[in-house]
Image (cartoon, rainbow, N blue to C red):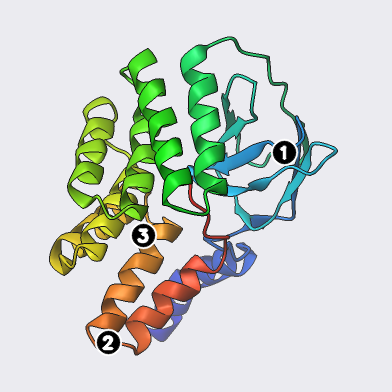
Amino acid sequence: MALALSLFLAPRIALSQRRPAVSSRTTLSALTITTEPKAIVWLDEIRRGVTDTTGKLTLTKITTGRHTMRVRANGFKEVTMPLLPGRGGNIAVKLLRTNDEAELKFQQAETAREEAKDDAAQQQAAELYRRALKLRAAFPAAHVGLARVLLDLNEYKQALTEIEGARAKRPVYPEASAVEGRIHREAAFTDEASRSFRRAIREARGFQPEAHVGLARILEEMGNTQKRSLNIVRRSNSFPILSR
């Protein structure tokens, strides 16, 4: 019996020894994007940074597999492109000038929001978003940008209306769900905030930094400051937490 068992297991043991260990989180060493200066780069809808004055940005900690990259620079048409598995090294992204008034107004709104220092500046940014939406009704990103401004202005009901507007054109939208979670949290609707943050993470297939941080803060506020909240924050530390 022992001899028969050893003969049965021997090929399987040898096969398992020949198989290299494969990490489920294998990463590429680096990926350098070359495009216009001061261009914003997203990877899988996560904002990863801004190119320098020479138009370069190096991304690290990229898991293997298929990804989607989005690049935008003021005055240029936004580009979305796939990154095939195993692609690394240098990638040149050519952006074309745009005369699209809605896109240009949206870019102005994004810049105004990021640079806003007071309520008056935020109101100006909100007006730019509204102008962009008048020029192009189906503009989910403009709805989310406006929602962010309204959140900062404590106009929660209007902010949620903008999230609904974004979802009407883009039902699966991790960033919109994350912003919705922030709105609910600021309005002290903890259960709704938790559901929105979890939805964002689910829509992003497991990783949405803004939602992870928001969920961790809810857990902390509920008194659960132990492993659950710490683990969520640690997962978010892989990338910078930047708004759209």
For label 1, the SS is loop
Quadrant in which the N terminus is drawn: bottom left
| Residue positioned 36% across, 38% down in the render | 146
Mark 3: amino acid:
Ala
Q: Looking at the picture, does residue 53 appear above or below residue 221? A: above
How far apart in space, not on screen, are marks 1 and 2 (Cα)?
40 Å
Q: Label 1: which residue?
A: 38
Mark 1: amino acid:
Lys
Residue reaching furthest right? 54
If you read the primary sequence from the N terminus, does the residue marked by circle 3 or circle 2 appear first? 3
Q: Looking at the picture, does residue 134 appear above or below residue 142? A: above
Q: Looking at the picture, does residue 182 appear above or below residue 34? A: below
Q: Label 2: which residue?
A: 224
For label 2, the SS is loop
Left or right: 220 as drawn, with respect to 121: left
Q: How many marks?
A: 3
| Residue positioned 57% across, 47% down in the render | 115
Q: Residues within 10 Å of mark 3 (few under 14, many from 20)?
A: many
Q: Looking at the picture, does residue 218 appear above or below residue 27? A: below
Q: Residues within 10 Å of mark 2 (few under 14, many from 20)?
A: some
| Spot occupied by residue 202 in the image (x, y as percentages of width and height) | 30, 52
Disc number lying in front (1 or 2): 1
| Residue positioned 31% across, 68% down in the render | 215
| Spot occupied by residue 14 in the image (x, y as percentages of width and height) | 59, 68
Residue 200 can be seen, yes or no: yes
Q: Label 3: which residue?
A: 211
Q: Nearer the viewer, residue 112 or 20?
A: 112
| Spot occupied by residue 123 in the image (x, y as percentages of width and height) | 40, 41
